[in-house]
Image (cartoon, rainbow, N blue to C red):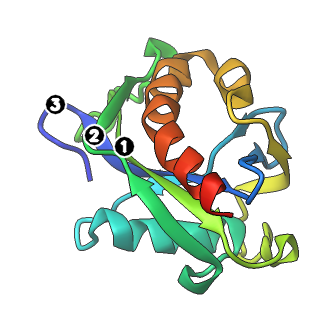
Protein backbone atom coordinates (compact mmCIF):
# COMPACT_ATOMS: atom_id res chain seq x y z
CA UNK A 1 0.00 0.00 0.00
CA UNK A 2 1.62 3.26 -1.18
CA UNK A 3 0.34 6.56 0.21
CA UNK A 4 -0.22 9.79 -1.73
CA UNK A 5 3.35 10.95 -0.99
CA UNK A 6 4.88 7.75 -2.41
CA UNK A 7 5.72 5.92 0.83
CA UNK A 8 4.93 2.22 1.11
CA UNK A 9 3.34 1.20 4.43
CA UNK A 10 5.50 -1.33 6.20
CA UNK A 11 6.15 -3.03 9.53
CA UNK A 12 9.63 -3.52 10.98
CA UNK A 13 10.17 -6.29 13.52
CA UNK A 14 12.73 -6.13 16.32
CA UNK A 15 12.84 -9.38 18.30
CA UNK A 16 14.76 -9.45 21.57
CA UNK A 17 15.78 -12.21 23.94
CA UNK A 18 15.84 -12.01 27.74
CA UNK A 19 19.41 -10.62 27.63
CA UNK A 20 18.37 -7.68 25.45
CA UNK A 21 20.07 -9.01 22.32
CA UNK A 22 18.30 -8.50 18.99
CA UNK A 23 17.59 -10.93 16.18
CA UNK A 24 19.61 -9.83 13.14
CA UNK A 25 18.92 -11.58 9.83
CA UNK A 26 20.96 -11.95 6.61
CA UNK A 27 19.16 -11.46 3.30
CA UNK A 28 19.24 -14.64 1.26
CA UNK A 29 22.21 -14.86 -1.09
CA UNK A 30 23.55 -11.44 -0.02
CA UNK A 31 25.87 -9.97 2.54
CA UNK A 32 23.17 -7.54 3.71
CA UNK A 33 21.77 -7.89 7.22
CA UNK A 34 18.63 -6.25 8.60
CA UNK A 35 15.63 -6.64 10.87
CA UNK A 36 12.68 -8.52 9.39
CA UNK A 37 10.22 -6.17 7.72
CA UNK A 38 7.43 -6.24 5.19
CA UNK A 39 4.61 -4.40 3.52
CA UNK A 40 1.15 -3.86 4.93
CA UNK A 41 -1.63 -5.04 2.63
CA UNK A 42 -4.71 -2.84 2.09
CA UNK A 43 -6.88 -5.17 4.17
CA UNK A 44 -4.43 -5.41 7.10
CA UNK A 45 -3.77 -3.48 10.26
CA UNK A 46 -0.10 -3.00 11.19
CA UNK A 47 -0.48 -5.73 13.82
CA UNK A 48 -2.00 -8.15 11.26
CA UNK A 49 0.95 -7.46 8.94
CA UNK A 50 3.36 -7.95 11.83
CA UNK A 51 2.15 -11.48 12.51
CA UNK A 52 1.98 -12.42 8.81
CA UNK A 53 5.52 -11.16 8.19
CA UNK A 54 6.77 -12.76 11.42
CA UNK A 55 5.53 -16.14 10.18
CA UNK A 56 6.75 -15.67 6.59
CA UNK A 57 10.21 -14.32 7.37
CA UNK A 58 11.30 -16.04 10.58
CA UNK A 59 8.72 -18.80 11.06
CA UNK A 60 7.39 -17.51 14.37
CA UNK A 61 3.75 -17.28 15.43
CA UNK A 62 1.93 -14.97 17.82
CA UNK A 63 2.33 -17.53 20.62
CA UNK A 64 6.15 -17.46 20.21
CA UNK A 65 6.43 -13.73 20.95
CA UNK A 66 5.04 -10.94 23.09
CA UNK A 67 4.57 -7.39 21.80
CA UNK A 68 6.49 -5.04 24.10
CA UNK A 69 6.05 -1.81 22.15
CA UNK A 70 4.96 -0.26 18.87
CA UNK A 71 6.38 3.06 17.69
CA UNK A 72 3.98 5.94 18.26
CA UNK A 73 4.48 7.50 14.84
CA UNK A 74 5.26 6.24 11.36
CA UNK A 75 9.02 6.39 10.74
CA UNK A 76 10.02 7.23 7.16
CA UNK A 77 13.01 6.60 4.97
CA UNK A 78 13.61 7.53 1.34
CA UNK A 79 15.13 5.18 -1.17
CA UNK A 80 18.27 6.30 -2.98
CA UNK A 81 17.52 7.38 -6.56
CA UNK A 82 19.05 4.21 -8.02
CA UNK A 83 16.61 2.05 -5.97
CA UNK A 84 13.47 3.86 -7.18
CA UNK A 85 11.57 2.03 -9.92
CA UNK A 86 10.39 4.98 -11.99
CA UNK A 87 8.31 2.83 -14.34
CA UNK A 88 5.87 1.74 -11.60
CA UNK A 89 2.49 3.23 -10.80
CA UNK A 90 2.09 4.34 -8.11
CA UNK A 91 5.67 5.44 -7.69
CA UNK A 92 7.30 4.31 -4.43
CA UNK A 93 9.97 6.69 -3.11
CA UNK A 94 10.48 5.02 0.27
CA UNK A 95 8.89 3.35 3.23
CA UNK A 96 6.86 4.49 6.21
CA UNK A 97 7.13 1.99 9.02
CA UNK A 98 5.55 1.04 12.28
CA UNK A 99 8.26 -0.62 14.35
CA UNK A 100 7.41 -3.40 16.79
CA UNK A 101 9.58 -4.61 19.67
CA UNK A 102 8.84 -8.25 20.46
CA UNK A 103 10.25 -10.57 23.08
CA UNK A 104 10.94 -14.13 22.02
CA UNK A 105 8.92 -16.26 24.42
CA UNK A 106 9.87 -19.62 22.93
CA UNK A 107 13.20 -21.32 22.32
CA UNK A 108 15.64 -20.06 19.68
CA UNK A 109 15.10 -23.22 17.63
CA UNK A 110 11.59 -22.01 16.79
CA UNK A 111 13.16 -19.48 14.41
CA UNK A 112 12.73 -21.08 10.97
CA UNK A 113 13.99 -19.04 8.02
CA UNK A 114 12.97 -21.53 5.32
CA UNK A 115 9.34 -22.01 6.31
CA UNK A 116 8.05 -20.46 3.06
CA UNK A 117 8.86 -21.38 -0.53
CA UNK A 118 10.52 -17.96 -1.05
CA UNK A 119 12.57 -17.27 2.09
CA UNK A 120 13.97 -13.77 2.56
CA UNK A 121 16.80 -14.71 4.94
CA UNK A 122 19.37 -17.50 5.06
CA UNK A 123 21.03 -16.82 8.42
CA UNK A 124 20.38 -15.04 11.69
CA UNK A 125 22.11 -14.31 14.99
CA UNK A 126 21.70 -12.40 18.24
CA UNK A 127 23.49 -9.04 18.31
CA UNK A 128 24.03 -6.26 20.82
CA UNK A 129 21.36 -3.56 20.85
CA UNK A 130 23.12 -0.75 18.93
CA UNK A 131 25.05 -3.02 16.54
CA UNK A 132 22.47 -2.81 13.68
CA UNK A 133 22.77 0.97 13.30
CA UNK A 134 26.32 0.67 11.98
CA UNK A 135 25.71 -2.47 9.94
CA UNK A 136 22.46 -1.81 8.05
CA UNK A 137 22.59 -0.27 4.58
CA UNK A 138 23.34 3.44 4.91
CA UNK A 139 20.00 4.85 3.72
CA UNK A 140 18.18 3.01 6.54
CA UNK A 141 20.49 4.13 9.36
CA UNK A 142 18.55 7.19 10.50
CA UNK A 143 15.26 5.31 10.73
CA UNK A 144 16.99 2.46 12.59
CA UNK A 145 18.47 4.97 15.03
CA UNK A 146 15.11 6.67 15.65
CA UNK A 147 13.35 3.34 16.12
CA UNK A 148 15.96 1.92 18.49
CA UNK A 149 15.94 5.11 20.53
CA UNK A 150 12.18 4.78 21.01
CA UNK A 151 12.34 1.04 21.71
CA UNK A 152 15.15 1.24 24.28
CA UNK A 153 13.01 2.17 27.30
CA UNK A 154 10.45 -0.62 26.71
CA UNK A 155 13.35 -3.07 26.23
CA UNK A 156 14.98 -1.98 29.49
CA UNK A 157 11.64 -2.39 31.33
CA UNK A 158 11.33 -5.90 29.90
CA UNK A 159 14.88 -6.87 30.93
CA UNK A 160 14.34 -5.59 34.49
CA UNK A 161 11.29 -7.89 34.78
CA UNK A 162 13.24 -10.98 33.70
Q: Are marks 1 and 3 in contact (CB under 8 Å)?
A: no
> Left or right of 27: which side holds 87?
left
> Left or right of 64: which side holds 5?
left
Q: Residue at the location (42% across, 35% down)?
A: 150
Residue 154 in sight: yes
Structural distance between the alpha carbons of marks 1 and 3: 14 Å
Residue 79: quarter of image: top left
Earlier in the chain: of badge 2 and badge 1, it is 2
Earlier in the chain: of badge 1 and badge 3, it is 3
Q: Residue at the location (51% across, 24% down)?
A: 145
- Res 74 label: 2
Check the image and name the residue furthest to the bottom.
63
57 vs 85, nearest the viewer: 57
Structural distance between the alpha carbons of marks 2 and 1: 5 Å
Q: Are marks 2 and 1 in contact (CB under 8 Å)?
A: yes
Q: Which residue is mark 1?
A: 97
Callout 2 environment at 10 Å: few (<14), some (14 to 19), or many (20+)? some
95 vs 91, nearest the viewer: 95
From the image, state whether disc 2 or disc 3 is nearer to you. Answer: 2
60 vs 41, nearest the viewer: 60
- Figure check: 65 above or below 23: below
Amino acid sequence: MIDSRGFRSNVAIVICNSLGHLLWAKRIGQGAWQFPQGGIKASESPEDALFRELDEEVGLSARDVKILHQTDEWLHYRLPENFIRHNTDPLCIGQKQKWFLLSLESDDDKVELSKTTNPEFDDWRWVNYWYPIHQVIEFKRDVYRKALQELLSPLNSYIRQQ
